Image (cartoon, rainbow, N blue to C red):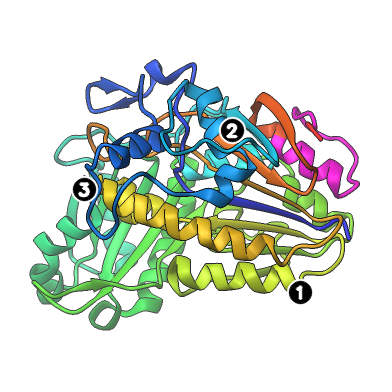
Amino acid sequence: MARAFLIVMDSVGAGGAPDADRFFNGQRPDTGANTLGHIAEACAAGRAEVGRSGPLKMPVLDGLGLGAAVRLASGAPMPGFEATPAGLWGAASEVSKGKDTPSGHWELAGVPVPWDWHYFPDTDPAFPDWLMAEVAAKAGTAGTLGNVHASGVPIIEAHCAEHLRTGWPICYTSADSVFQIAAHEEAFGLDRLLKLCQDMAPTLHAMKVGRVIARPFVGGPGNFKRTGNRHDYAIAPPAPTLLDRAAGAGRKTHGIGKIGDIFSMRGVGELRKGGGDIGLSEHLQALAADAEPDSFTFANFVEFDTLFGHPRDVAGYARALEWFDGVAGAFLRRLGPGDLAIFTADHGNDPTWTGTDHTRERVPVVGWGVGPRAIGLVGYTDVGASIAAHLGLPPEGPGRSFL
């Protein structure tokens, strides 16, 4: 059937990025960061025992070559990962000048980012006065709240009461190239929040800020909860991606999770979202059984990053990895002759590292459908080129197929 599935385990890095010294968490360079390597080390040493126990267990993906891929990428010992690879395996390096979600996904789809992203300074305030005035004008409010670098939960807690009293939107950023607006779904209004972010997107995109993110929540001070209605308004890729090329050739394309946001829906024929990573896993299983011949499915599983990487929760990250390994096994059992599945990541987010930002790392590349195959150290764009080759699309862009 020649179907292709590209599954991004968001932030599941393998260490070893050759340019990690140029990327930082605070004042500390990312040299030595290793998401999978350090989690496996912590599990083997008994330092990740909350909700799980013992060495990290990922027999399905290790059977394809995950442990071998991490050892290739960074030299990490990967205790408990001793399988002889039965699948395609290697590790990929990024050339885009960022360690963020759009950069990683675009480059995996064949389009490295040709510009430097704009990052807001880690100062108080973080944003220029004119930008805050534009937000307030578009929101129809007398002002805004926040205006700092922050994580979503603490800043909503700090400003929730005042937001409910004044109706002013809560604006914040992070070490990524993002502008985030949090507001109450009911008191402020979800549609109003989404429109505000959509209206602000052209201004932020002109500054080369990668994403404007709507962060809705419900509840009140002390008991608020962020909802699943987050929406990212991302800059459109600067050139045709693998999704565009597949759709242009008449292939059915499916996005799972954040893919529609990341690619501004370009080339995404059908998008399946909702239910967190558990819900996304159900969509993946369904498409493994039902996706059309010669179709392309692009999936992002984000909760490794959002729930466990940024909060630096090692045990939680390990639990998520072990759960996902079971998902991968059930998914692979539904594939048939001619199918190709590649598991990789977009960047790292080492939960043992300083700070709360992503970490610059190589990423593992493991695949099912072509038998045992060591591909060595490759580029992100080679992943997209290889899927294009499997789908019978003509070569285009900087990548080279490893199939």
Cα gap from disc 3 to disc 1, whole angstroms:
42 Å
Amino acid type at circle 2 is Val
The x, y position of residue 182, in whole percent, is 27, 64
In-image side of 371 versus 108 (left or right):
right
Residue 399 is one of the magenta-drawn residues: yes
**Label 2 belongs to which residue?**
113
> Is 325 covered by the magenta stretch?
no
Q: Residues within 10 Å of mark 3 (few under 14, many from 20)?
A: some
Q: Earlier in the sequence, mark 2 or mark 1?
A: 2
Which callout, 3 or 1, points at the residue further toward the start of the chain? 3
How far from the left and from the top, in percent, is residue 269?
73, 67
| Cβ atoms at labels 3 and 2 below 8 Å apart | no
Disc 2 is placed on an element classified as loop
The reply, left or right, for residue 255 in relation to residue 18 is: right
Return the residue nearer the eye: 5 or 262. 5
Region in magenta: 383-401
Vertical order, 28 against 199 (above or below): above
* 320, above or below 93, in the image: below
Question: Which residue corresponds to the image point at 39% horizontal and 72% vertical from the top-left?
Answer: 228
> Would residue 344 be seen by someone viewing this image from the given angle?
no
SS at circle 3:
loop
Other-residue count near label 2 (Cα within 10 Å), few / some / many at <14 / 14–19 / ≥20 = some
Question: What percent of the width, then of the height, locates residue 364?
Answer: 56, 36
Tell me if mark 1 has few (under 14), some (14-19) or many (20+) residues whose alpha carbon lies within 10 angstroms of its own.
few
Q: CA–CA distance between discs 2 and 1?
A: 33 Å
For disc 1, the marked residue is 290
Q: Position of residue 105 (x, y in %)?
A: 58, 44
Residue pointed to by mark 3: 150
Q: In the image shown, does 206 or 29 lie closer to the viewer?
A: 29
